[in-house]
Image (tube, rainbow, N blue to C red):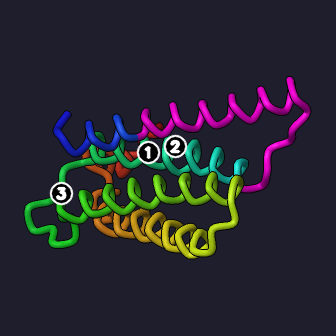
Amino acid sequence: MYSLVRRYIKTAITFLALGLAIGFAVMVRRELWGTWPSPYEVSAHTHAILVGFVMMMIQGVALWLFPRPEKEDRRYDPRLAALAWWCMTTGTALRLAGELGRAWSDVAGLPLVIVAAGALQVAGIAVFFHTMWSRVRSVGSAGREAKGERF
């Protein structure tokens, strides 16, 4: 497992821990004090788990397990996969901070931070799957499928 894969997976685990902490905190407040979470807290929890953990774990495992790029492949670029990590990590961290900030304050610039963070998340996912598209291919199964093997 090379360094960028480890970075994706460890970052995913970090966002899982953050998502669990946010979820636990809002559950305790709801169950012990009767305070329901705001939509911003729900959004922060959801983005920590679904984007920060699930998507980044999928991306890290895809980098690790998908077939290597072919020698003439010009689409796959590890620098783009690293750029996608930066967009996803920065966007998700800012999204969590912005959403939680909106739950607790009315600072004027937070809506713009949240929108910019969401744009970074979208850009990171788009860049990642753009650069990985050519690696989504059969390696040894095409010949077996041509012979009629089913799996």
Look at mark 3 in the image and give the residue it sits on. Answer: 69
Element type at mark 2: helix
Given contact means CB atoms under 8 Å apart, are the residues at marks 1 and 3 in contact? no
Q: How crowded is mark 1: few (under 14 residues within 10 Å), some or many (20 or more)?
A: some
- Residue 18 % position (x, y): 53, 36
Given contact means CB atoms under 8 Å apart, are the residues at marks 2 and 1 in contact? yes
Look at mark 2 in the image and give the residue it sits on. Answer: 54
Q: Residue furthest right?
A: 34
Magenta stretch: give its range: 12-40
Q: In this view, does 13 lie above or below 103?
A: above
Looking at the image, residue 123 sits to the left or right of residue 4; the answer is right
Q: Which of 129 and 136 is in front in this view?
A: 129
Q: Nearer the viewer, mark 2 or mark 3?
A: 2
Q: Earlier in the sequence, mark 2 or mark 3?
A: 2
- Residue 43 % position (x, y): 68, 53
Q: Residue at x 8, y 62 (%)?
A: 71
Query: Is 110 in the magenta?
Result: no
Look at mark 1 in the image and give the residue it sits on. Answer: 58
Q: Nearer the viewer, residue 57 or 138?
A: 57
**Total tally of numbered discs in the picture:** 3
Element type at mark 1: helix
Q: Locate the N terminus by quadrant.
A: top left
